[in-house]
Amino acid sequence: MSYQVLARKWRPRSFREMVGQTHVLKALINALDNQRLHHAYLFTGTRGVGKTTIARILAKCLNCETGISSTPCGQCSVCREIDEGRFVDLIEVDAASRTKVEDTRELLDNVQYAPSRGRYKVYLIDEVHMLSTHSFNALLKTLEEPPPHVKFLLATTDPQKLPVTILSRCLQFSLKNMPPERVVEHLTHVLGAENVPFEEDALWLLGRAADGSMRDAMSLTDQAIAFGEGKVLAADVRAMLGSLDHGQVYGVLHALLEGDARALLEAVRHLAEQGPDWNGVLAEILNVLHRVAIAQALPEAVDNGQGDRERVLALAQALPAEDVQFYYQMGLIGRRDLPLAPDPRSGFEMVLLRMLAFRPADVDGAPRSPLKDLGISKATADSSSNPVAGAAVAAPVVAPAAVPAVPPAVPASVMPEPAPTPAPSAPQVAAAPEAVVAQPVAEAAPAVPSSSTPVPAVAEAEKIDLPWEEAAASEVPPEIAPAPVEETPAPAVAEAPSAPLVEPKAVEPVVSAELPIADVPASVDVPPVAEAPTPEADDDDEPPMADDYYETDSEAYAYLDALDPAEDSAVAEPEPLPAVQPATGLAAEWLDLFPRLGLGGLTGSIAANCTLVAIEGDTWRLHLDPAQSALFNANQQRRLNDALNQYHGRPIKLEIELIRPEQETPAQAAARKRAERQRAAELSIQSDPLVQQMIQQFAAVIRDGTIEPVESV
């Protein structure tokens, strides 16, 4: 006798033998027992979850010789023929191979005939979503009102492709994927009945590899029995599937928990011997971390879907919750960046080393060997080695009477005592101060603010002139020289006149940004800060060349609005002044000639601000507005001359004088017409009846600058 695969041998033959799908079985059993039968059923779900099996059991329940019930006898001829696939009144149709409308019409031609042997003629259409649109249309009427002796059982893995007209005519049952626990439970029963030795870890591997399909799990079990020579062992199944040893994932996590870089890299080396998919390994680590986070939030919610519930709970007790979240986030980012790594293994190692390197150092179980010091300045460095802190010490310090509290740069108890000076009211800088003991003061003297600290306000103080020339001679740059402050009386406990602290000899001055002048009070004189000289523009430099030309509107002269912004961004062109007189004679001829020259860019701007004043033979003399002299040079004159030569077809000598034109230029004409259009547009809006009604009834206001004329096309 030929061997029968486990998926077919252990196919359920009654509802009692079904594994899972309780929500579907309950509805069908109650409908059969109460004789509340629908004429069309639709079963949806992924492959191998029991769609066809349930349809065959339902057909058996409808046609069993003992009567319609949810428990067919399984012994009568009808039950045996259905189990063997040769019952004449059970018509199984593979919609994937019979998609044409002719096949559907042929099928429906026999619907009107009564069943040959059974109680009902059952049409089981598998993968019904493969039917064509015309086939669905041909099926609609019969599916909605079939003869009383006909039942339709439809099965599909993709219900989204079914028309809503089909879905509305059927009772739809969605079958769920099989969880790994249910698959392992069923495989344990099957292998026990088949007398096949197995390991439970191997069944968990098969259950996860089946991905919710019981048929896939049975097929993989057949393959594992053949691979293991009649046994189902975890090592053989892992080698057959090419999957990762789940224990090695926990090895990586335990190395992270211990902070042991050596153990971490050793775990990676063992993983590399299996040639795994490193992205998949990272996904497994994230899956475990996800379950660990669930165990920390709600331990009873952790399932045993992978047979490692105890290990997950143990890891949840050992790992801090913040570390779990940190590792999970780093793993997600690592999966995103893994394709950018030189090779997958090095990218995977860098993700783990990043987890190890950025782990908080003040938690229990921190890395046992700190990373090697690379010589990078640390945030906790001593202020003595910080040049900015040294600059704060070097600044003169005075304790005024009414000054807002400013944190001192250096405590008064450790500051060097200033050198005695005969004039306590004027701060001076000593060339080489000697270390002395600090004098007792009433309170700590705040440091003069640096470039990032606003100068404190001093109330009712007389101005003090600071000898800047003397300060410059003492090697203190004027950029960091302190602002002068008012003279305050010495505290009662200090008998000696107070003098400003000076910079120690060992500390180099630091050049900082200039003080914010806006915060200096009016009573304090702030000397001007020397600014770096700005390079003057070279008058001999020519403005950018005008390479682009365009056709202009002869009526509106809208060339100024269409100039290339990239060319003219360096020079801001002023709005032309109104003309002294309207254009007549030669000036009017220049207004008419200008748009025909096709000039653009800077050359067009020069020509637009000119007017023609004289023509003597082939010599043309133009007057150019002196306000446009920054744009004018010999190159622009040459281009304008070339345009005139090309237009008239003969050489013309062009002379341009920087004299303000007395008559209207093209630029002035364009500005005048724009203003006229703007005034016309505003008058049109203001006189509109609807606008007037809104102003009167709703107190509406026309906002200035929001009206623009519509340009003619």
Image (tube, rainbow, N blue to C red):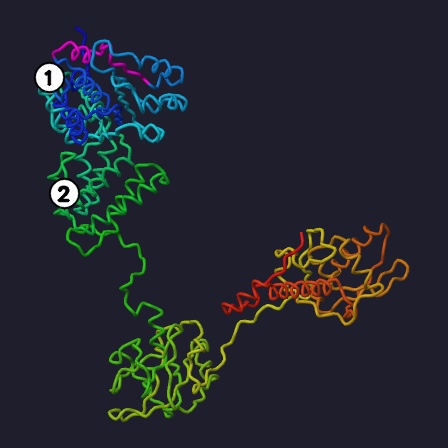
The percent position of residue 309, horizontal first and vertical second, equals 12, 38
Query: Residue reaching furthest right?
Result: 617
| Crowd around label 2: few <14 · some 14–19 · many ≥20 (10 Å) | few
Along the line of sight, the residue nearer the viewer: 246 or 466 = 246
Task: Please indicate, yes or no, whether residue 158 appears anywhere in the rendered image.
Answer: yes
Q: Is residue 699 left or right of residue 654?
A: left
Quote the CA–CA distance across marks 1 and 2.
34 Å
Name the amino acid type tagged 2. Answer: Ala
The percent position of residue 705, horizontal first and vertical second, equals 57, 66
The percent position of residue 473, horizontal first and vertical second, equals 46, 81
Quadrant that contains the N terminus: top left
Report which quarter residue 458 is drawn in.
bottom left
The residue that appears at 24% across and 27% down in the rendered structure is 242
Does 667 appear in magenta? no
Along the line of sight, the residue nearer the viewer: 606 or 519 = 606
> Which range of residues does the magenta coloring cover?
75-94
Along the line of sight, the residue nearer the viewer: 215 or 440 = 215
Instruction: Give the mark, 1 or 2, whose residue is nearer the N terminus.
Output: 1
- Under circle 2, the secondary element is helix
Q: Do the residues labelled 1 and 2 touch (CB within 8 Å)?
A: no
Residue labelled with disc 2: 301
Name the amino acid type tagged 1. Answer: Glu
* Relative vertical location of residue 384 with respect to residue 309 in this rendering, above or below: below
The percent position of residue 316, horizontal first and vertical second, equals 14, 46
Task: Please indicate, yes or no, whether residue 183 appears anywhere in the rendered image.
Answer: no
User: Looking at the rendered structure, which numbered label has been put on residue 309?
Assistant: none
Along the line of sight, the residue nearer the viewer: 556 or 515 = 556
Does 79 appear in magenta? yes
Residue labelled with disc 1: 194
Report which quarter residue 241 is drawn in.
top left
